[in-house]
Image: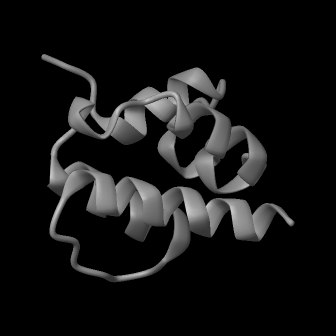
Amino acid sequence: MEKGLLDHVAEQTGSVCLSDLRNVECRCLCACLGELPAEAYSLWEWTDAVQYLTGAEKCFSSRSEARDFLLRMLDAAAK
């Protein structure tokens, strides 16, 4: 079974479990997510990552829209 988006990010950031992602620096999350092409994961997974990592409940029309929103939110939080 293929790893989900949040599981992949958790592994890449050295998080033991998904809840640890909330303690990872936003810059680190941006770096990890920025390397992933939008097409690598489903729209549902990108939308779920947005909600889990930012708390924002939004609907997106494409994977790239969701990925870009997530990166913008994390980048803004890092500043």
Q: Is the N terminus in the top left, top right, bottom left or bottom right quadrant?
A: top left
23 versus 79 height, above or below: above
**Residue 11 appears at what percent x and percent y?**
52, 23
29 versus 52 height, above or below: above
Q: Is residue 42 left or right of residue 40?
A: left
Q: Is the C terminus in the top left, top right, bottom left or bottom right quadrant?
A: bottom right
Q: Is residue 30 left or right of residue 24?
A: left
In the rendered image, the residue lying farthest to the right is 79
30 versus 8 height, above or below: below
Q: Is residue 20 left or right of residue 40?
A: right
**Can residue 36 be spotted in the picture?**
yes
Residue depicted at 40% across the width and 33% down the height: 7
User: Residue 23 versus residue 68: which sits nearer the camera?
Assistant: 68
User: Residue 28 versus residue 63: which sits nearer the camera?
Assistant: 63
Residue depicted at 22% across the width and 35% down the height: 39
**Residue 59 appears at what percent x and percent y?**
22, 79
**Residue 38 appears at what percent x and percent y?**
30, 40
Residue depicted at 25% across the width and 30% down the height: 40
In the rendered image, the residue lying farthest to the top is 1
Q: Is residue 79 left or right of residue 68?
A: right
User: Residue 58 versus residue 3: which sits nearer the camera?
Assistant: 58
User: Residue 30 versus residue 57: which sits nearer the camera?
Assistant: 30
**Can residue 48 be spotted in the picture?**
no
